[in-house]
Amino acid sequence: MDKHKRLINLVYSNSKYMGKHIVIIGGKIYSAENGKLASKLLDKLILQHPNETPTITYIPKADALILLIPFDEN
């Protein structure tokens, strides 16, 4: 698990992954430019590593703004 955490830290600290979809599986980092390509990549990687659970994320670009809108249940 320590290697997995190092890979996650590498993804978040390396600017080459900004604006990309990331899949971590089998001790390696894979990236895709958009969601459609990421989905195809994930399908391929799951077949190659059937007994592993992938970590999937999107790394926003540096100038991306993420807004949180509170949800009122009433």
Image (cartoon, rainbow, N blue to C red):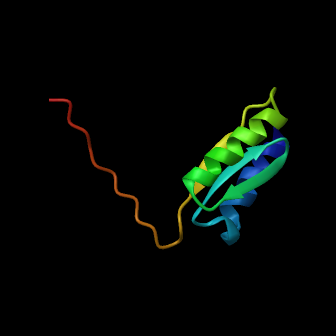
> Which of these two is toward me, 73 or 60?
60
List the single residue furthest toward the top.
51
Q: Quadrant location of the C terminus?
A: top left
Tally the numbered discs.
Answer: 0
Is 45 left or right of 22, judged from the image as shown? right
Task: List x then y, in percent, for residue 32.
Answer: 66, 58
Is 60 left or right of 51, judged from the image as shown? left
Asked where in the image residue 10 lies, by quadrant, the reply is bottom right
Asked where in the image residue 19 lies, by quadrant, the reply is bottom right
Q: Residue at x 28, y 49 (%)?
A: 69
Q: Residue at x 84, y 36 (%)?
A: 48
Task: List x then y, in percent, for residue 27.
Answer: 85, 45
**Above or below: residue 30 compared with residue 64:** above
Q: Residue at x 62, y 45 (%)?
A: 39
Q: Quadrant location of the N terminus?
A: top right
Is 17 left or right of 1, judged from the image as shown? left
Task: List x then y, in percent, for residue 41.
Answer: 70, 47
Asked where in the image residue 59 lies, by quadrant, the reply is bottom right
Is 44 left or right of 20, judged from the image as shown? right
Task: List x then y, in percent, for residue 37.
Answer: 63, 53
**Above or below: residue 15 compared with residue 30:** below
**Above or below: residue 39 compared with residue 13:** above
> Which of these two is toward me, 47 or 54?
47
Q: Residue at x 67, y 65 (%)?
A: 17
> Which of these two is toward me, 40 or 24?
40
